[in-house]
Image: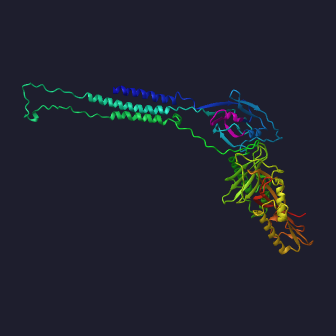
Amino acid sequence: MRFVWAITAFVLATLMIGAGIAQRTILQAPATQTASVTTDDDAPYVLVDGSVFDSRPGAQTLRVDGDAVFAAYARTGDLTQWLAPTDYTHVTMSDAGEPTSEFVSATVEQGEGESLTADPVGSDLWLDEFQQEGDLSTTLQLPADMSLLIATDGVAPAPSSFSISWPTGATTPWAGPLIVAGGIVLLVGIFLYILALRHVRRSRGPRRKGLPLAATQPIDLSLEQSEKGVISSTPRRRRLSLGRKSVLAVPTAAVTAALLAGCTPGAWPELGSSPTPSPTESVIVPEGQGAPAVTQMQAERILDRIAEQVNAADEAADADAASARLAGPALTERETNYTLQKEIDDQAPLAAIPSAPVTAFLPQAQDGWPRMFLAVVEESDGAATIMTVRQEDPWSDYKLTYLSSLRADASMNLAAGYVGAVAVEPNSPFLVMAPEAVAGAYADVLNNGDDSEFAAVFDGENDPFRAQVAENRATLLKNFNKTGEETGKVSFRARAGAAEPLSLVTLDSGAIVAVTVVESESVVPTDEDAVIKLGDNVVVKALSGVTQSKSGFTTRYADQLYFFVPAQGSNEKIQLIASRSNILDAKVVD
């Protein structure tokens, strides 16, 4: 009977292990589902709509066939705007649920000899990009509102063949348990088989009969032991060796372990309860508000590019190279510095543009152009720099426009980066002061101090820049009066700069407003025979091109200032949160 149970266990184990292996091999469903696309057009770009990637759940594996492949993804609206000046092939989902392609002609005319979209590499619009010599393969997870651009170099036809694969989610949850249970049953069968063999060997031991003796013949117990025929009344037991059976069990266990090693998590049932997602704080996006212009990762990459290119321009003192990544007052101050470096041997360059880490970030919620974002970068010495970076159109790079040193005690109530904030119109009536009026009002405060009609609007108690300007003016006037009080005079005047104010709304309905103020220092003679000599003022000499003048000199400084402007009806004052000042130019008074 023991053999019957052992054979039954062997048969059952074979069936169970075989069923488990079959689930993982011949009976297993495909792990992925693939959609292949082939286009017939010779357009330089292929735009794969987000609906194609989002047509099936799970991560997407993209494979593009070609000798040189470029791919990038971004918001669908940004990609279609970028592709407007050129022809391209648009791949979307058909009503039948299959990818289909159509040729799209250019909708924006390019100027003669102008190519807006020739080279897709390095555009600031891309959230990420990939380049590969030969076939390209990468894993993505694009939502429906993002699309993928495929090209070679923007001139040659784009690769015409690619595929997208999704995981099917097919699992074999009972393969693992069947193989494990089969292995256990197999071991039980082996044990039963060993017991059966042992039982048989015991039952077949030697059974010898006793010697026939006559009933009247006694047995002489006095015979010598050597003369006796020794007959054992108890048969000698043979030792049963389990060595061979152990050898049989070892490879069986090894085979079972090898089978288990190939079982992935998909080969086991999920017996535990599914985790319940914890509620997250809801974010209310105003109706009609656009998407954030950039993500934080994208903004950090843009800042890295700006820092790298401006650093190269600084080393060469090349204003044209700097203009590729700078604009407005940020470019103007560097143009002046480059001029000074060429004229003065020991003139120090401006500090490098910081790029990381970004500690605060606020993108404009804008689907169109121009668009901008604000970023705060903390430097190694603990100082923080606030920057406003702007993009004029889809084909232009982002350019750093405003750059200032953030006060250590500055407070900004910014929205989350994934929500963004709308820009404030220069003439907005929803703030205590329109952004376009802030620079002029603050300039009047610098000129007239507490006597200014706008003095009560600004927070003067927490304004170190205003105190510094007053101190610098007093020092310059004192030094000039030591020798020139009787023959000349010094005057100071501040006015609003020409740069457009850039503003983004804060969570408390106020705004962070970036403006420029231009300060002028004029030294003119009061005696007809007097001449204003520059002496050792090499900076004014280099910028004006002369060493003395009978009409005097005017030196101008550009101040890049950031203010927090409260909402209309607030009792708060306008606060200066960041400032930066550098020489702008120096000229002979007309």
The reply to whether residue 331 is in sight is: no
Q: Residue at x 33, y 31 (%)?
A: 195
Indicate the quadrant containing the C terminus: top left, top right, bottom left or bottom right.
bottom right
Along the line of sight, the residue nearer the viewer: 348 or 96: 96
The quadrant where residue 198 appears: top left
Q: Does any portion of residue 350 appear in the rendered image?
A: yes
Residue 391, given in percent of the width and then of the height, sits at: 77, 47
* Above or below: residue 332 compared with residue 257: below
Q: Quadrant of the N terminus?
A: top left
Tell me the magenta residue range.
47-75
Q: Residue at x 26, y 27 (%)?
A: 204
Compare residues 164 and 315 and report the one nearer the observer. 164
Image position of 287 with respect to 435: above or below = above
574 falls in the magenta region: no
Q: How many marks?
A: 0
Please provide percent x and percent y for residue 27: 53, 27
Q: Residue furthest right?
A: 528
Q: What colour-coding does the image apply?
A: rainbow
Residue 267 location, x and y as percent? 52, 34
> In screen coordinates, is 199 left or right of 236?
right
Measuring from the top left, give residue 453's x and y in whole percent. Answer: 85, 61
Q: Is residue 57 magenta?
A: yes
Q: Nearer the viewer, residue 580 or 291?
A: 291
